[in-house]
Image (cartoon, rainbow, N blue to C red):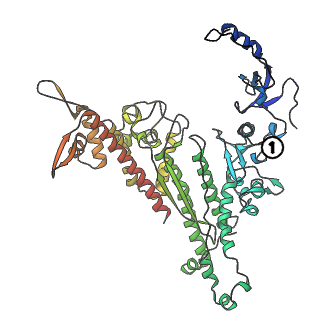
């Protein structure tokens, strides 16, 4: 039941305030009008103004107090919408069931559920989430992880009876599924399960035998059943995750991938998954000494594949995520993740990642309070002194321009994240030598940022517009070229000159300080973005094995 309300304190919702408020008192519009008219009793041409007579159409200004204790003046309290239904005070899991669906009522419903630690709310087949910025447990059950394996298996198959319901009452029912006589609350796992179940169900729908009267009996007898299975059409499924920076898109992506990997792995053990249990193919059994050996070998390979799929997330975060003013783990690139399933068994058989629009400007410049990509800080926090000395990083974060020359941007999680990143590189098949090369390229980018330029001085002590590298930059240039395997003279020439072809002749045009600095930054961006692209290609190559 809704809370008790008195005539002196009724909750309202304003389309301007977007939160419940109580009318404290009306503001005397007549008094304010007389005050303003006293100072200007006549118009600009000296003509006396006519007195305004109040009418029922005049706005009624009022002083209101919102639920957070703030006082506000509103121009017309008649525009406030009374909150009269119980859902206006208790929240509702599906906003399509609101008596009045408006922007104000929608935000009010989300706020009520958020205060109850219900961060997920449905809008039919769409799931809305509010980032809690804290570890989540099951509401009403302290200590139980909201994303535990038990919760995953609880939602497995929960949307099976509602697959295909994309609008109307069917879509609403799909978001309020009864399992064991208990309604499951809104969750990311529902979205993942609905997509997974729809994928496998589309195969079954395409394999239904035609009616005998619709096809020649002789043709039906001649058809090979296995051939028909190979020719079926699968309806691919998509899960679109959108929101502003800090809304929780990265975490939602990881949770959905963890769910898909877990239920398919569970299916291989006969406890879930799409096929109701793991079955080895005839080819696998023929190549093994026994059916049991084939099952064990295939299960080990599939488990390894699922681990590689999940290990791609920490790698992409380390090299493509950074701290911003709104979000400590903001993805600074777009990605499209495609996971392939065996429709016979429901297991993961491959995956690929497409990336686009990596924020390259962050490599060289960050505003106050933001950071470069995580991997730079992980290297300083997690690597031992010998590694830092090997790559010329013993000066620390504060000694590098591309890290803002600020040592206060370290995070307590950087050290543990570095260990996780190195483990993920192992998962995708990067050797120890390969990992050293990756760290060396990261260090080279930092050394490139410490190369400075100055104007060339003539014999008379004057300066021209041509640039040269400063003497203090020699070590940074040497270290960067050593780590990248490049010649110092060629790198220096590329930064300080520009090649022009005029009339078939090549001319080396000297650059000024600003132009040389731009070329240095462009080179550093190219090196890092190439490393990121290599990382994505390496992940895809591993997932396709």
Depth check: give the residue in front, 11 or 476.
11
- Residue at coordinates 52% horizontally, 49% vertically from top-left? 314
Question: In this rendering, does residue 444 appear at all?
Answer: no
Quadrant in the picture for the N terminus: top right
Quadrant of the rendered image containing residue 229 = bottom right
Question: In this rendering, does residue 508 appear at all?
Answer: yes
Residue 52's place in the image compared with 483, above or below, is above
Left/right placement of residue 373 relative to residue 518 reads right
- Residue at coordinates 81% horizontally, 24% vertically from top-left? 56
Depth check: give the residue in front, 176 or 166.
166
Quadrant of the rendered image containing residue 443 = top left
Q: How many marks?
A: 1
Residue 156, percent from left and from top? 71, 59
- Residue designated by label 1: 99
Residue 275, percent from left and from top? 67, 69
Residue 252's place in the image compared with 164, above or below, is above
Residue 199's place in the image compared with 460, above or below, is below
- Residue at coordinates 36% horizontally, 32% vertically from top-left? 399
Depth check: give the residue in front, 357 or 281.
357
Residue 321, percent from left and from top? 49, 44
Disc 1 crowd rating (10 Å Cα; few below 14, some 14-19, many 20+) is: few
Q: Secondary structure at mark 1?
A: loop
């Amino acid at each position: 039941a809704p809370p008790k309300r008195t005539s002196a304190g009724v909750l309202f919702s304003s389309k301007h305030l977007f939160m419940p408020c109580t009318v404290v008192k009306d503001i005397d519009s007549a008094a304010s009008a007389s005050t303003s008219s006293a100072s200007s009793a006549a118009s600009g041409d000296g003509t006396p103004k006519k007195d305004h007579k109040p009418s029922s159409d005049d706005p009624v200004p009022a002083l209101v107090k919102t639920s957070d204790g703030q006082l506000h003046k509103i121009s017309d309290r008649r525009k406030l919408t009374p909150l009269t239904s119980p859902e206006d005070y208790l929240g509702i899991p599906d906003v399509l069931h609101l008596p009045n669906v408006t922007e104000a009522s929608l935000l009010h419903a989300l706020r009520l559920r958020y205060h109850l630690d219900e961060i997920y709310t449905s809008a039919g087949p769409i799931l809305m989430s509010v980032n809690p910025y804290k570890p989540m447990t099951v509401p009403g059950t302290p200590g139980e992880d909201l994303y535990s394996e038990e919760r995953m298996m609880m939602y497995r198959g929960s949307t099976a009876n509602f697959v295909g319901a994309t609008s109307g009452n069917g879509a609403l029912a799909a978001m309020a599924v009864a399992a064991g006589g208990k309604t499951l609350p809104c969750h990311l796992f529902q979205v993942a399960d609905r997509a997974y179940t729809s994928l496998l169900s589309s195969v079954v729908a395409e394999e239904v035998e035609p009616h005998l009267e619709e096809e020649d009996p002789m043709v039906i007898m001649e058809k090979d059943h296995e051939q028909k299975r190979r020719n079926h059409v699968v309806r691919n499924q998509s899960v679109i995750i959108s929101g502003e920076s800090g809304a929780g898109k990265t975490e939602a992506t990881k949770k959905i991938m963890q769910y898909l990997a877990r239920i398919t792995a569970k299916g291989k053990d006969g406890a879930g998954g799409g096929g109701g249990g793991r079955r080895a193919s005839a080819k696998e059994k023929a190549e093994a000494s026994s059916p049991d050996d084939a099952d064990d070998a295939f299960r080990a390979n599939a488990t390894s594949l699922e681990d590689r799929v999940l290990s791609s997330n920490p790698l992409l975060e380390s090299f493509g995520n950074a701290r911003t003013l709104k979000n400590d783990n903001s993805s600074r690139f777009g990605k499209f993740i495609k996971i392939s399933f065996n429709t016979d068994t429901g297991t993961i058989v491959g995956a690929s990642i497409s990336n686009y629009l990596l924020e390259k400007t962050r490599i060289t410049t960050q505003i106050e309070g933001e950071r470069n990509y995580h991997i730079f800080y992980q290297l300083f926090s997690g690597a031992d002194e010998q590694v830092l000395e090997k790559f010329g990083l013993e000066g620390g974060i504060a000694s590098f321009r591309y890290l803002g020359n600020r040592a206060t941007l370290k995070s307590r999680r950087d050290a543990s994240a570095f260990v996780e990143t190195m483990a993920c590189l192992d998962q995708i098949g990067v050797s120890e030598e390969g990992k050293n090369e990756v760290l060396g390229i990261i260090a080279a980018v930092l050394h490139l940022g410490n190369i400075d330029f100055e104007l060339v001085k003539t014999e008379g002590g004057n300066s021209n517009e041509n640039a040269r590298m400063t003497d203090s930059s020699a070590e940074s240039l040497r270290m960067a070229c050593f780590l990248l395997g490049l010649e110092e003279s060629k790198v220096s020439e590329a930064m300080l000159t520009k090649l022009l072809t005029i009339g078939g002749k090549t001319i080396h045009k000297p650059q000024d300080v600003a132009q040389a600095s731009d070329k240095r930054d462009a080179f550093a961006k190219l090196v890092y973005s190439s490393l990121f692209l290599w990382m994505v290609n390496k992940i895809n190559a591993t997932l396709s094995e």
